[in-house]
Amino acid sequence: MIDALQKMRGERTIIMVSHRPSHIRLADRVLQLENGMLVHDGTPEQIYARIGEKTL
């Protein structure tokens, strides 16, 4: 599935839900929600620098 998503990258908007850091690192932008509220928004690198990989 990830290979298919990688091939479509740039062609369309893809919204993916994941808890796996390896999948999150592939994203251009990450939105983290807690209790229905947006708590973090940025690139994977920005998010991991702010909160760390284990807490995402």
Image: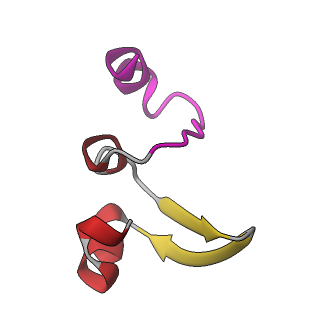
Residue 7 falls in image quadrant: top left
Left or right of residue 50, residue 30 in this image: right
The residue sitting at 52% across, 73% down in the picture is 41
Q: Could you say where residue 55 lies in the image, as x and y percent from the top left?
A: 35, 71
Give the residues in magenta. 1-18
Instruction: Please count the marks in the image.
Output: 0
Q: Could you say where residue 54 lies in the image, as x and y percent from the top left?
A: 26, 67
Indicate how the structure is coloured in the image: secondary structure
Q: Quadrant of the C terminus?
A: bottom left
The residue sitting at 40% across, 53% down in the picture is 28
Is 35 inside the magenta-drawn segment? Answer: no
Q: What is the magenta segment's predominant secondary structure? A: loop
Seen in the picture, residue 18 relative to 45 is either above or below; the reply is above
Using the image as rendered, state which of residue 8 and residue 49 is in the foreground.
49
Seen in the picture, residue 23 relative to 35 is either above or below; the reply is above
Q: Could you say where residue 5 lies in the image, as x and y percent from the top left?
A: 43, 23
Seen in the picture, residue 39 relative to 26 is either above or below; the reply is below
Q: Quadrant of the N terminus?
A: top left
The residue sitting at 47% across, 60% down in the picture is 30
Left or right of residue 53, residue 39 in this image: right
Residue 16 falls in image quadrant: top right
Left or right of residue 8, residue 51 in this image: left
Using the image as rendered, state which of residue 4 and residue 19 is in the foreground.
19
Seen in the picture, residue 44 relative to 1 is either above or below; the reply is below
Q: Farthest residue in the right direction?
A: 36
Q: Could you say where residue 37 lies in the image, as x and y percent from the top left?
A: 72, 75
